[in-house]
Image (spheres, rainbow, N blue to C red):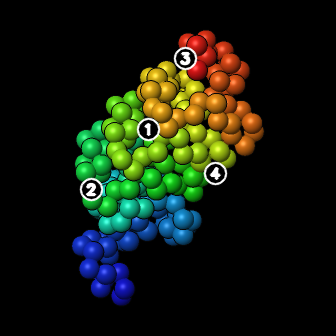
Amino acid sequence: MAIRNSGFEGAEKILVLAFQKLGAYWAFQGTSALQHVDPHNVNDREIIDVLVKLPGSRHATDALRYALKWNEPELVCRLLERPDMDDSVPDSNGQTPLFWAIQYKRVDIVKLLLQRQEVNPDTPDRNDFTPSQVAVCVRSLPPVELLLQLEEVNARRTDAGNSSALNIAAARGEPEIVNLL
C-alpha cells in the first residue's frame, strides 16, 4: 500500500520485478538490486531503466557504480547530470564513486569526477585506503598521474596497514609509478 501511494512512478512495478528477478533473499540483504542485473541481458533492461530513475543520492550513486562496473559511459554522464547526485556518498566500505572509477580503470570518468567540486581526491575508505593507493593497486598509471597533479592528494599518506602508495608500488614492482611518487 505504501509503495502504491509513494508517488514514485513505477515503484510498484520495480518491487514486483525485483522479487521476480532477484527473489526475496536479495531484496532484504541491503544490496542494490542493480548489482544483480546484467545490462547485456535484454530481459533486464526494463528493471535497469526503473532502478536508475529512483530518486535520492544513495540510489544515484548505486546507479553510478553499476554504470562504471559495466562500462556504460552514456549512463554515467546522464547520472552525473542528476541534481541529486552527490559524488561524496560512500558505499558500505567507505568508497566513493572516484574509488570505483579508478578500480574499473575508467580514466575518462576519473577526469570528470576530479573536476567536480564535491569530490575530495584524498578521502580514504574505512580502512584508510586512498584513491591514489587504489590506482597503484590496479596498476593504472593515468589515474596516478591525474591524482598527483592535485595539491589535496598526499601520496605519502598511509592506510590502516601502514602502507603508502609508494610502498604498494614498490612491493608490486611498478618502477614507472615508483618514479612518479
Disc 3 versus disc 1: distance between alpha carbons? 21 Å
**Among the 4 quarters of the image, the one containing residue 50:** bottom left
Query: Which residue in the protein does label 1 denote?
Result: 101
Disc 3 versus disc 2: distance between alpha carbons? 35 Å
Query: Which residue in the protein does label 4 denote?
Result: 126
Residue at 37%, 71% in the rendered image: 16
Residue at 64%, 35% in the rendered image: 157
Query: Is tag 1's residue or tag 2's residue first in the polypeptide sequence?
Result: 2
Mark 3 crowdedness (10 Å alpha carbons): few <14, some 14-19, many ≥20: few
Amino acid type at image mark 3: Leu
Query: Do the residues under discs 3 and 4 have CB atoms within 8 angstroms?
Result: no
Q: Which mark is residue 82?
A: 2
Mark 2 crowdedness (10 Å alpha carbons): few <14, some 14-19, many ≥20: some
Amino acid type at image mark 4: Arg
Disc 3 versus disc 4: distance between alpha carbons? 26 Å
Disc 4 versus disc 2: distance between alpha carbons? 27 Å
Rendered-image quadrant of the C terminus: top right
Disc 1 versus disc 2: distance between alpha carbons? 18 Å
Image spot of residue 54 (x, y percent): 32, 65
Q: Is residue 22 above or below residue 175?
A: below
| Label 4: element kind | loop
Query: Is tag 4's residue or tag 2's residue first in the polypeptide sequence?
Result: 2
Q: Is residue 69 visible?
A: no
Query: Do the residues under discs 3 and 1 have CB atoms within 8 angstroms?
Result: no
| Label 1: element kind | helix
Q: Residue furthest front?
A: 151
Query: Is tag 3's residue or tag 2's residue first in the polypeptide sequence?
Result: 2
Rendered-image quadrant of the N terminus: bottom left
